[in-house]
Amino acid sequence: MKFQLILENQNGDQINMTTTANQYMISEIDGLYPPAGTISTATYAGMDGSYLNNAFIEKRNIVISFKMRGTGLETRRHLLYKVVKPSRYIKVYYKTRSVDVYTEGIVETCEIQNFGGLVSGQISILCPDPYWYSTSAEVAYYSKIVGGFTFPFSVDSSGVPLGTYSTTDNVSLINSGDVTGFTIQIEAFDNAMTPTIYNADTGAYLRINGEVLKGDIITITTKTGNKTITLNRNGVDSNIINSLVSGSTWLQLSEGKNTFHIEAVRNCKNLKVIFFHTNAYLGV
C-alpha cells in the first residue's frame, strides 16, 4: 500500500519518512488502528452480572520502525534528531489514496541502531488525544441573506441578484468520521438577543443568554477537552462561558447527516452562524 508519513515539530520543521528508497525505509507503523477501550464495572450484591461505571478510549501509541541505507547516513540521522526529540511535541501526517489525516502527540523515544550492516531505528509517539483528524475543514453557514455576487462577474440586460433571502433556519452538515465536537461562530450584523442552536434530530440545544451587539463575534468550541465560549467585541476577546444557559448541551456531530436549527429571542435575522468541523477517526 502506498502511503506518505511526515513528522513535524513545534517549530514547523518537517521530515518526510517516505521520500525515497535512499531516505527512511519504513518497515512497520503500529498504532494506526483504534486504541483499546478501558471499561470499568462493578458487581451487584447478591445478583448476577455487573453494571457499567465508565468506559473510555485509551491514548494512542504510534510506533514507527524504519531502516536507513545509502550514503549520508550520519547527516540524515541528525536531521531526524532535529525534528524528533524525546518529550517534545510532534505532529504526524498520514496520507493514503483514501485518507489525509493528522494527529498530535509527544515523542516518547527515538532509538537508532547505527553499528551494524544496516542502520535501523524506532520512534514511539504517545498521543493523549486518540483521534486522527482530516487535514481539511468542512464549513456550513446560516444567514437570512445569501450572497449572490461572485467573480468573474458580468451582468446581462436582465440584471442579476446581489443576494437572496433564505426562508429556512436549518443548516445541514455531513460528518464522514466518528462522533466529534465542532466550532460554531456567531456573527451579528445588528443587535440580537439570546441566540440558540438546536439539534433538529435530537432536540438538544445550546443557548447563549444576553444581548448580542452589532459587530460581535461569538466562538463556541464543543470538542471534548477544549470546550470554550469566547466573545470578540471591539477587537477584545473575553470568556463568556458563564452565559451558557442551564440545560444547554455541548452539541456534538453524529456520524452522517446532522441538521441544526437557529433561533433567537429577538432578531434572528441579524445573525450569521458558521459551523466548522474536521472529520475525526479512531482508526485509519
Image: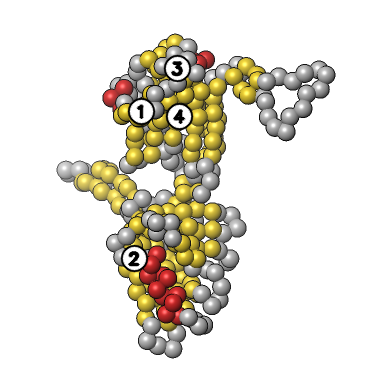
Whichever of labels 3 and 4 marks the residue nearer the N terminus, that label is 4
Q: Nearer the viewer, residue 178 or 230?
A: 230
Q: Position of residue 257 (x, y in %)?
A: 54, 35
Whichever of labels 4 and 2 marks the residue nearer the N terminus, that label is 2
Above or below, comparing residue 238 to residue 280 in the picture: above
The residues tagged by marks 3 and 4 sit, at their Cα atoms, a distance apart of 14 Å
The residues tagged by marks 1 and 4 sit, at their Cα atoms, a distance apart of 16 Å
User: Residue pushed farthest top?
Assistant: 266
Image quadrant occupied by the N terminus? bottom right
Q: Nearer the viewer, residue 35 or 90?
A: 90
Residue bearing mark 4:
185
Classify mark 1: helix, strand or loop. strand
In the rendered structure, the answer to whether residue 149 lies left or right of residue 125 reads: right
Whichever of labels 1 and 3 marks the residue nearer the N terminus, that label is 3
* Label of residue 214 in the image: 3
Residue bearing mark 2:
85
Classify mark 4: helix, strand or loop. strand
Q: Position of residue 104 (x, y in %)?
A: 39, 54
Whichever of labels 3 and 2 marks the residue nearer the N terminus, that label is 2
**Which amino acid type is marked by label 3?**
Lys
Identify the residue shown where x is 54% and y is 28%: 141
**Which amino acid type is marked by label 1?**
Val
Q: Mark 1: few, some, or many residues within 10 Å (few <14, many ≥20)?
A: few
Whichever of labels 1 and 2 marks the residue nearer the N terminus, that label is 2
Identify the residue shown where x is 42% and y is 71%: 79
In the rendered structure, the answer to whether residue 228 lies left or right of residue 136 reads: left
